[in-house]
């Protein structure tokens, strides 16, 4: 719906609401050149309107690069979390089919696999990790890298299974492939989170936007009169909006409305993992019945 996608977000969206307020502030600033046009200082301080053509061209290039770079970070993060969903499902299936865990081990493995994305989410957001899932007698240490600790517990279970002769080398390699993907995804997400957009470029772009918005109403007030106020608001809304949205999108792991729905994806992974291990438990209990049919 046009109204739902165009007008309603100005009220419901916190980000666009902030952009609109800043654009209205620039519109209020544009009252100054209008006051000058109807005062004794009419011929003082005029800004040639042609200067904005040059500024708009340069700013357009900067904004395109800025937006593309920010969206690339967001899309890479989304791709990584999509891979995490697939890797978690594949790992669960292979742990069930090749690892053949007992009921108690299956519950623990299910909890570990489902915990990994939640711990990664907290790690990326800088949230203090909860008490770790312990499968060994080692003391708890909440300062450790919790996703790595969880992966280590899974590796420890596989190693123990192999030493007991319950897991062949080929089966171990197959499971190891999926388990290694979890750590690769973790490292790639941390690279995005810990590598901010180049600060100097951001400052340079904002200086260009500020220069354009400060001079724009002075250049069009003579030609457009009172219409220069709404025109200035429209221009400011989209110029500021592109920068604000790009700033939010380039940090995809936070809590903003434009960030990834990490909580939803963690829930999806947990539901899938629990279903896979639950199906295995049911099939194990009914295995003798199936064979006799």
Image (cartoon, rainbow, N blue to C red):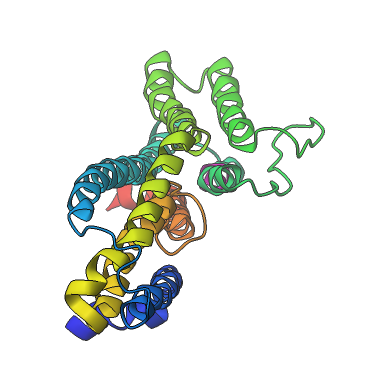
Residue 85 place in picture, x, y as percent = 38, 46
Residue 191 place in picture, x, y as percent = 47, 31
Along the line of sight, the residue nearer the viewer: 279 or 150: 150
Number of marks drawn: 0
> Is 212 colored magenta in this rendering?
no
Q: Quadrant of the N terminus?
A: bottom left
Quarter of the view holding residue 146? top right
> Is 113 colored magenta in this rendering?
yes
Q: In percent of the image, x 33 and y 68: which residue is there? A: 237
Along the line of sight, the residue nearer the viewer: 89 or 226: 226
**Does any portion of residue 238 appear in the rendered image?**
no
Depicted 82 relative to depicted 260: above or below: above
Q: Which residues are magenta?
A: 110-115
Q: In percent of the image, x 42 and y 58: which residue is there? A: 261
Question: Main structural element of the magenta stretch: helix, strand or loop?
Answer: helix
Along the line of sight, the residue nearer the viewer: 229 or 24: 229
Residue 138 place in picture, x, y as percent = 79, 30
Along the line of sight, the residue nearer the viewer: 192 or 137: 192
**Does any portion of residue 175 appear in the rendered image?**
yes
> Residue extending furthest right?
139
Q: In percent of the image, x 40 and y 82: which residue is there? A: 11
Quarter of the view holding residue 24? bottom left
Q: In percent of the image, x 27 and y 79: which residue is there? A: 230
Residue 253 place in picture, x, y as percent = 48, 49
In the image: residue 3, left or right of residue 262: left
């Amino acid at each position: 719906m046009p109204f739902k996608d165009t007008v309603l977000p100005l009220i419901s969206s916190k980000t666009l609401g902030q952009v609109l307020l800043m654009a209205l502030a620039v519109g209020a600033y544009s009252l100054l050149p209008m006051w000058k046009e109807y005062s004794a200082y009419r011929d003082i301080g005029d800004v040639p309107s042609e200067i904005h053509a040059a500024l708009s061209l340069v700013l357009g290039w900067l904004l395109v690069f800025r937006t593309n770079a920010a969206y690339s970070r967001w899309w890479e993060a989304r791709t990584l979390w999509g891979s995490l969903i697939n890797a978690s499902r594949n790992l669960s299936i292979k742990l069930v089919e090749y690892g053949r865990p007992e009921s108690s081990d299956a519950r623990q493995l299910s909890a570990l696999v489902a915990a990994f994305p939640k711990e990664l989410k907290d790690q990326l957001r800088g949230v203090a990790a909860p008490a770790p899932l312990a499968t060994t007698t080692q003391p708890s240490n909440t300062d450790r890298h919790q996703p790595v600790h969880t992966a280590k517990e899974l590796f420890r279970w596989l190693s123990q299974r192999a030493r007991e002769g319950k897991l062949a080398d080929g089966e171990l390699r197959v499971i190891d492939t999926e388990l290694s993907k979890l750590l690769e995804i973790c490292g790639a997400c941390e690279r995005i989170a810990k590598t901010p957009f180049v600060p100097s470029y951001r400052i340079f772009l904002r200086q260009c936007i500020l220069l354009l918005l400060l001079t724009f109403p002075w250049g069009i007030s003579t030609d457009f009169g009172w219409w220069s106020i709404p025109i200035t608001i429209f221009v400011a809304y989209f110029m500021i909006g592109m920068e604000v949205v790009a700033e939010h999108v380039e940090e995809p792991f936070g809590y903003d409305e434009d960030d990834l729905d990490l909580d939803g994806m963690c829930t999806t992974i947990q539901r899938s993992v629990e279903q896979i291990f639950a199906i295995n438990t049911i099939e194990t209990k009914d295995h003798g019945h199936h064979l006799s049919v």
